[in-house]
Each structure stands twice: as structure tokens, then as C-alpha cells.
Amino acid sequence: GDSVTQMEGPVTLSEEAFLTINCTYTATGYPSLFWYVQYPGEGLQLLLKATKADDKGSNKGFEATYRKETTSFHLEKGSVQVSDSAVYFCALADMDSNYQLIWGAGTKLIIKP
Amino acid sequence: DTAVSQTPKYLVTQMGNDKSIKCEQNLGHDTMYWYKQDSKKFLKIMFSYNNKELIINETVPNRFSPKSPDKAHLNLHINSLELGDSAVYFCASSLQGGSYNSPLHFGNGTRLTVT
């Protein structure tokens, strides 16, 4: 079945550092890929998405490119801020999952000033 | 203004009790969900309703019973609470068709602590 694997956290960086959070997936079809973010004490919210190979999703300075050849959707940001501290979830949805989200385990990001 | 609202925000109760969590969305969405998030932040879908009809019922104990009086509300009732039920429960909603085409909108969660 479909699955999503994310790098284990927590990831701790200093402000203005470059961020990469790795995400790889397993799917038999052609999934859509998502990043959701959960700020402390809140529910998740969609950060960005990509629906086909080579698409790049972007929002709030974050980017992720749908790489079919490596089955990856790594999240990147050039210069992180303290306010980016949150838990980031990678997810996919496709026909095999009945279009319901298959979630990664989440990666906690801590940004120190 | 709140798009998906859950009550209560915190719920502390003893083993064996019965409790309910309420959820309402004002986004006009057709599909609503209940998720459980454990202490390690792992998310697990429990139920999904589309226009008041149950469409996903994952393997959860039958002590958990969702109820959808209308498409804007999805409540979660839990009987005979156990220690392992302690978690954060999230309600979410999306347009019909599920999360493939429509992002999920989450409530802020209900932290349930069973003592």
C-alpha cells in the first residue's frame, strides 16, 4: 500500500539557516503530494502541494518539487525564522488511497534565534 | 469567524467515563473527519463523513461513535474511556471528493487526558 516516510526530528537550526526536510513516498499510481504545517497549539494547515511530476509547490518561502524518479517531495526554505518552528507533515493522496491522505510521521522543526 | 471549531479544548476525565467532543464547520464543506494524534504527533484517521453519511471507519474500538446531525456538524462520543485514549483529537473538513482536490481545514484540537 501507499506510504510516506519523513526524516525523523527534531530538526534544530539557527535563524537564517537553510532548511531541508526529506520526504519520500511509495505509491503504485500517480499521487498528489502535500506538505501540511502544525504550529504549536493549533491544527494542521496546508502549506503547499504538487499534483504531477516536476511540479513545484511554494508558499511562505517554502518550496517542494515533485520528483517522480526519486519518489521524493523534499521541503526547503532558504532562510528560516523563529516563527517557522512547527511540526511539518508530508502526505499523499491517490486512487489507491481512495483519495484520502496518507500521512508521514511528522518532523518537528525548532529554530533558535 | 472560526472555520472549524471544536469544543472543549481540554478534557480531563477518569477511566470508565463517557464523554463527547463537538465539531462544527462554517465553510460549507461536504466532508468531515476525526483524527487522533498521539504524543509523538503521529496522525491517524478515525472516521470520515460525507453529507452525514459515514464513508471511512478505520479500525477504532466501537467505544468511539461519531454522530453527524447535519453536514456542518460531526460529534465524537467515547464510551468507557481508557488510559490509552489520551491524545489530541482533531476535527477537519474538506469539499466533497476528499483531500485530493480540496485541502483539509483542521480545528485546533481537543486534548483528552484520561486519568
Image: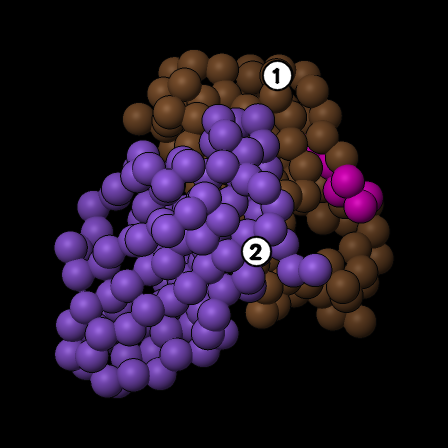
The answer to whether residue A17 is visible is: no
Q: Chain B in the picture: what colour?
A: purple
The answer to whether residue A66 is visible is: yes
Residue designated by label 2: B4
Q: Position of residue A112 (x, y in %)?
A: 74, 70
The residue lying at 61 percent from left, 67 percent from top is A40
Residue designated by label 1: A52
Give the position of the C terminus of chain A as an image quadrant: bottom right
Q: Chain of mark 1?
A: A
Q: Secondary structure at mark 1?
A: loop
The residue lying at 69 percent from left, 20 percent from top is A55
Frontmost of labels 2 and 1 is 2
Give the position of the N terminus of chain A as an image quadrant: top left
Q: Is residue B30 magenta?
A: no
Q: Chain of mark 2?
A: B
Side of B53 relative to A17 (left or right): left
Instruction: Read off the magenta span.
Output: A59-64
The residue lying at 71 percent from left, 30 percent from top is A57
The residue lying at 42 percent from left, 32 percent from top is A100
Letter of the brown chain: A
Q: Position of residue B102 (x, y in %)?
A: 58, 32
